Image (spheres, rainbow, N blue to C red):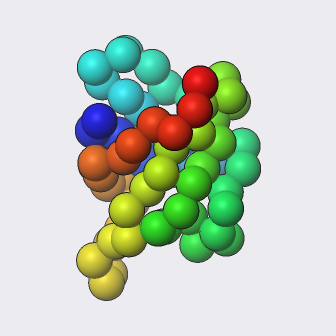
């Protein structure tokens, strides 16, 4: 699924899933740099994010995979 990752002015990372009209803060990350691993959203969803191209900046839209509810 397509997911937009962005950072608010307060520095909070969030994920927006347009198909579900869902935006949730990212509350946990498998890797500190966020990329190429699982992130957990405030609603409990876990998403597997791909490794980015070098120099990727936010906001960015990626193809993520939902791994749990």
Vertical side of 37 occupied by 27: above or below: above
Residue at x-position 39% and y-position 43%: 65
Quadrant where the C terminus sits is: top right
Vertical side of 22 occupied by 1: above or below: below
Quadrant where the N terminus sits is: top left
Q: Is residue 32 left or right of residue 55?
A: right
Tell me if I can see residue 9 in this picture.
no
Give residue 45's position: percent from left, percent from top: 59, 31
Residue 41 in which image quadrant: top right
Q: Is residue 69 left or right of residue 61?
A: right
Q: Is residue 4 left or right of residue 67?
A: left
Residue 38 in which image quadrant: bottom right
Tell me if I can see residue 2 in this picture.
yes
Residue at x-position 27% and y-position 38%: 2
Residue 57 in which image quadrant: bottom left
Give residue 15's position: percent from left, percent from top: 48, 38
Residue at x-position 58% and y-position 72%: 33
């Amino acid at each position: 699924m397509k997911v937009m990752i962005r950072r608010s002015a307060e520095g909070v990372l969030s994920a927006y899933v347009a198909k579900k009209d869902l935006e949730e803060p990212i509350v946990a990350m498998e890797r500190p740099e966020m990329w190429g691993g699982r992130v957990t959203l405030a609603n409990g969803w876990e998403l597997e994010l791909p490794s980015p191209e070098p120099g990727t900046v936010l906001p960015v839209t990626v193809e993520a995979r939902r791994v749990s509810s």
